[in-house]
Amino acid sequence: MKYFVALTFSLALLIFSKAYAYPNMIRHGYLNCMGCHYAPEGGSLLTQYGKGISQAMSFKGGEYTPSESKIVDDITLGGRLHHSIQFRGMTVRRGEPVAGKRYRTFPMQADYINQVDWAPGLRHEIILATAPNTARRRGVDENTNSKSSFTERLYFRTFKLEWMFIKGKKIAVGHDTLPMGLGIADHTAYVRERNRLGVTDVPLQFQFFSVSANWQSALSLFLPNNSDLKNNREKGLMGKSEFAFFRNFAVGLQGLTSNGKSINRRLLGATIRWGIPQFSILAENNYTERHISGASVTFPQWTNYLELGLFPKDYLKIFWNFQALTVSDPFFERERLTGLGFEAHWMANITSLVEARKRWSSVLDEKILMAQIFFNLW
């Protein structure tokens, strides 16, 4: 049995916070993210209201007071320019040395986010990001051990123009990640990591979003991104809809169909969100069928995610999650992961998370301890 102890320190230094869209806000009756985020689908920069909610739900509490400095007003073009910088690093300590090394420290994320409101309802959003150092260089498909330089790892995770032509209805065009699933922050979750093509999976998209008090939906027509590895490029259509039967209970369905150079895939999934002020349940299940182009080989895949959250205080979350991955022959794979931890929102701009995980399969049995801290300065 192998034991891994991982300490993860994540720093996000933000002028305007680009916080993750917390799906368990359904426990307070928030079906969509439009009130707290500039983007209805969430995950974008926080609005003034969102900053106030972040402050009020922290351990410190109180009210958020925006800056009235003329310098800040000039720099932000009268409040129309929003931007931020995010950095995340990781340190891993292994119980058994790998390649003679017990420790490994590396940056996981370094992003610059920029948004400008050009006119009422019209804005652009840009996220300039760096892929991990192990990511393969553009156009190099064969040598998986090659390391890329910093400039070679730069890519636009988001580069799009958005127009909200009616309140709650928006169209967008540009490069972006596909708006799928629960929107949980953990990018290594099976429902996220195993239902995409790669780290820089940001196709060119034509998007449509629609949100209301009890309904939200997203539709995307996507085309290949030239930054993707040649064999990963695909085109297709995806859609997602979520309906709130009650104020704090929502069920969603999603689907995707795509054709690529090497693999065609079809995905069908469902999500559930339910909560009361002290408790929440999040669940996502996806079935993916992949067909290798030019061969009579089709292999299904299941990814499952379940999280139970307990909130003794608004700023404190104690959670347990379970994840499962199953891939059928001829690429058989079965892996499970469970985690137990807590997340504390100390101030509007400081959040910490500690989680103990166990991951196992027929060839793997490991334990992981993760500790994260987020700093959001605006």
Image (cartoon, rainbow, N blue to C red):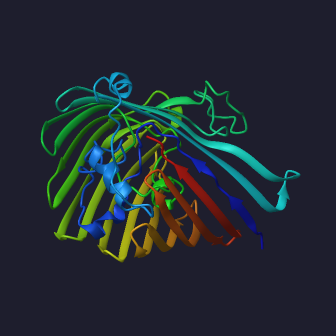
Residue nearer the viewer, 329 or 111: 111
Residue that extends furthest to the left in the rendered view of this protein:
166
Q: Residue at x 29, y 44 (%)?
A: 48
Q: In this rendering, is residue 13 above or below 30?
A: above
Q: How many marks?
A: 0
State which quadrant residue 165 falls in: top left
State which quadrant residue 207 falls in: top left
Can the viewer see residue 299?
no
Position in image of residue 350 (x %, y %): 50, 54
In-image side of 159 versus 220 (left or right): right
Residue nearer the viewer, 184 or 365: 184
In-image side of 301 versus 370 (left or right): left
Q: In this rendering, is residue 111 above or below 61?
A: above
Residue nearer the viewer, 172 or 139: 172
Figure quadrant of the C terminus: top left
Position in image of residue 374 (x %, y %): 54, 51
Position in image of residue 8 (x %, y %): 65, 55
Position in image of residue 58 (x %, y %): 42, 61
Q: Residue at x 39, y 35 (%)?
A: 203
Q: In this rendering, is residue 163 above or below 6?
A: above
